[in-house]
Structures are given as structure tokens and as C-alpha cells.
Amino acid sequence: MKSDFLTIIKRILNEFGWFKEKTGVVVAVSGGPDSMALLYALDALKSNYPMSLICAHVDHCLRTESSGDAEFVRQMAHSLQISFAMSKINVADSAKSLKVSIEEAGRIERYKFLEHVRQDNKCDWIATAHHADDAIETFFLRILRGSSPAGLHGISPQLGQVIRPLIRLTRTEISDYIEANDIPYRIDQTNSLTDTDRNFVRNALFPQIDKRFPDFRKPVLRTMNMIDRENAFLEEEGYELFQSSVRIHDGRAVINLGIVRSANRALVARALKCAVYSVSGPGIRLTSQHISACVHSAFSEKSGLITLPGNLVARKEHCEMTIGQNQSIASFPKSVEIRTQSQRCELTEYGFNLELRFLIGSEARLETANANHVFFDADKLSFPLIVRSPMHGDRVKLWGAPGSKKLKSILINYKIPKSQRPRIPLLINDGRIAWIIGLRRGVIAPVEKDTPKILEIISKQSGG
């Protein structure tokens, strides 16, 4: 039994190449049978792989005997001559401050500590004792709660720096290994309750299924493997869509909905998930409901705002969706003065720089004028000029258009997203809009045939 058990573990270690080179591994050990089996198995395999182990334990302070668990794990690590690291955290208090369940708070605090130990000791991996039964339980939980195919493939053998060497072994196989090798362990009596959803599935639902389908785990695992293979293909296709439709700018993901809408919605969901993770990192708890809401908004004609985990929002306006931090747009960039001696005006907050030159009439090449390159009669301007953001009630007379128009209407016609309108820079002369920088010139200070002194201004993106 020992040989078979370790052979299965070696197979997955070799398949993923986790321990090909000298490797440091933080082993998460609660003191229960699963984590003790993992600790002893990796210790037994040290002669086969160039790895060093650190045994890490978190006391959640949820049970009176939790300090006894911590001391037990410390002694076991000492007996195996393995380094030991421990953290004592009041998870109940964490759950209140984080506004999550105690189970979720425990998971967050556990992984935070394990990652801290990994980085402090320059280790490569965090090994947890998740096994095949855990994966099947997760599969059923996600079916009952509603999940995408990406969620139904169960628990991955690897997620980032976290590895699961026992993931292809069942709870029965682990118990047999423990018994055959006389491995000590502690029992958490709360695991036998049905108070949490996972405990209900494990202790109430599975025994009933076992009575009718005593070998149900094997076909379920086959189904999960098929879902995993097909989902991997869809993930690759979705990532290609992400690369072709999303650009990352200033910590935000900007999605071109014109490209996205030509794709199948199953791929769109995966592309949008990639977009969220490209901004957030892998730590947030993104659900299928979040992604479904983003997909629905992407194909809708209406603008909208979707709140995502990690203080993120997905803002859909016209043909773009932007995913980024939920920051108030009320913080307008500061106004900037342009004096006659200016040669270059830095407008970093707007993302623009202005280059200015004073010319005599014969030097100006007026045919080069465009939305980013304008000419004014310098003598008809009142200095200093001001660059500022739009204000409520702004109106402007545009070059080549009759009458004055509301600035808001012009920006809407140009399909400027509402969230970006407060950051559109305006060049102001004597209280009037002379130029919507990057869009349209106003009628102020036109250059005539006999204009003696001309101000040329070119706008360029910052860094340009």
C-alpha cells in the first residue's frame, strides 16, 4: 500500500515537474489525517527529489483544543527534523472585519500566512492536502450553487504557487496509507457535523449516494476530467480573444466590444474573465454571476456599471468596456495656465503635452491643421490661456459649424464615454472655449491672410 501511494504521488510530481530542481516547499499541516499523510509522504520522498520542507500550521482559535493541535504539529515536525512555522489568528474576528463567513475568513488567513512563509524562506511551492474526494465535494457544491464549466472541473493540481500532490488519491487511499505506516494525527470533531455546506455534502449527501451508487466517485472523476479537457480548450480560445480585444492602460483593461461581439458568448466569458484577472491578479473570488453580468452588459446596447470583487468595476459605455478600480470621477485634473513664454506645457494629469511656437504669418502651414494641431491669431488671444476640465453649462462655437452648442452634446456626439468626459482638456481664452483639445477647434482668434503673429499649438499624448 505504501509503495502504491507514493508511486501515485511521484507520478504527479514528475508530470508537473514541480521538483525537477532544488526546491523549497511549505507544507500546510492542520494535524488532521490528510495533511499528516502529505507531510510524511513528502518526507519519505526527500531522497528522490532535491527538496527541503517547512511545516506550516495556522491556529484559527475556533476550538478549545486548537492550541493542542498546534503543539501536536510542532512535535511531529520536530520528530521528522522539519522546520516549523506557525501563526495564531482569531478567525472569528477576521470574518467580522472582512464581512465574510468564518470558513472563508479561515481560507483567506491561511493562504496569507502560507504565502508569507513561502516568501520569507524563498520557497518555490505551497503544498496542500487536497485530494480527490475534496475535488468531488467541490464539484457537487458548485453544481448546487450554480457554476460555469470552468468551475466544474474541480480542484486543479496547481494554482499559482500552490500545489496539490494528493489530488489523485481518495480519502480511503489516504486512510490506508496512514494505517499501514502508523502515522499519528488529530481529529477535528467539527468535521463530522453538517453545519457547513461542505460538511453537509460530505457527511449527509455522500453517504446517501453511496447506498445507491457505491462506486460513484470513479465516474464522477471521469466526468470532471472530460470537463477539464474541454474547458482547457475553451480557455485557450478565450485567451486568444482576450489578446485581440483587450488593451491594458493605466492599470485598467479596456475591451473593444466591436471585436468581442463577433465571438461566441462562451469565449467572451473567458476573455472577460482574463481581463478582470489582468487587473486584479489571481487573489479575488470571481463568480460565474459576475462574469455573466459582464457578458450581458457587453452585448447590451445600454451603458452600465457592474460591481466586481476587489473594489473593481466594469464600466460599459458605447463600444468599450473598462475594468479597473472603483475610483470616483469627481477628482478633476487641476487647471493649468499657459503664459506667453511657454514653449512646452506638461498636462500629465490629462495625458497630454502641448508644444507651442510663435510664428510670423509666412511661416505657418495652415494646411497641417487638424484636431491635434491648431493655429491662432496670437494678437487676438488674452494671456494667460487656461487648460481645464469641462464645467456644467459649457458651450462652444465650433469652427465651421453654425451657432453655439452645449459641450456635453458635442462630447456625446463624439461618443466620448461619460466616465471620460471630465478628463477632456479644454483650452480657454478669456472664459471662452478656444479648442476642445484632440477633438475640435473653436472659432476664437482665427488666422486671416494678413495675420502678422500666429500661435501654433500641437497636442501630443504624454511620452509622445
Image (cartoon, rainbow, N blue to C red):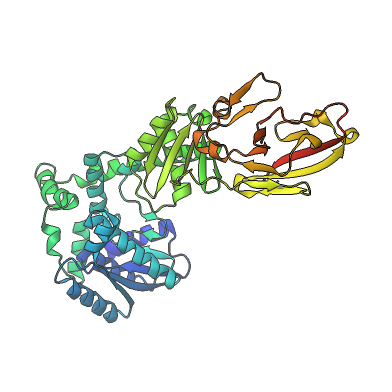
Which of 66 and 127 lies nearest the eye of the viewer?
66
Q: Position of residue 58 (x, y in %)?
A: 27, 69
Q: Position of residue 379 (x, y in %)?
A: 81, 36
Residue at the farthest right position? 362
Report the label total.
Answer: 0
- Looking at the image, which residue is at 44% across and 25% down? 301
Which of 36 and 444 lies nearest the eye of the viewer?
444
- Looking at the image, which residue is at 64% across and 20% down? 403
**Quadrant position of residue 229:** top left
Which of 199 and 226 lies nearest the eye of the viewer?
199
Q: Is residue 351 left or right of residue 15?
A: right
- Looking at the image, which residue is at 32% across and 72% down? 55
Whether residue 15 is visible here, answered yes or no, is yes
Q: Where is residue 231 in the image (x, y as percent from the top left)?
A: 38, 40
Which of 434 and 180 lies nearest the eye of the viewer?
434
- Looking at the image, which residue is at 52% across and 28% down? 258
Q: Where is residue 259 in the image (x, y as percent from the top left)?
A: 53, 30
Quadrant containing the N terminus in the rendered view: bottom left
Q: In this view, does 120 lie to the left or right of 72?
A: right
Whether residue 49 is visible here, answered yes or no, is no
**Quadrant position of residue 148:** top left
Q: In this view, does 377 lie to the left or right of 301?
A: right
**Can you say whether 58 is above or below 14 in the image?**
below
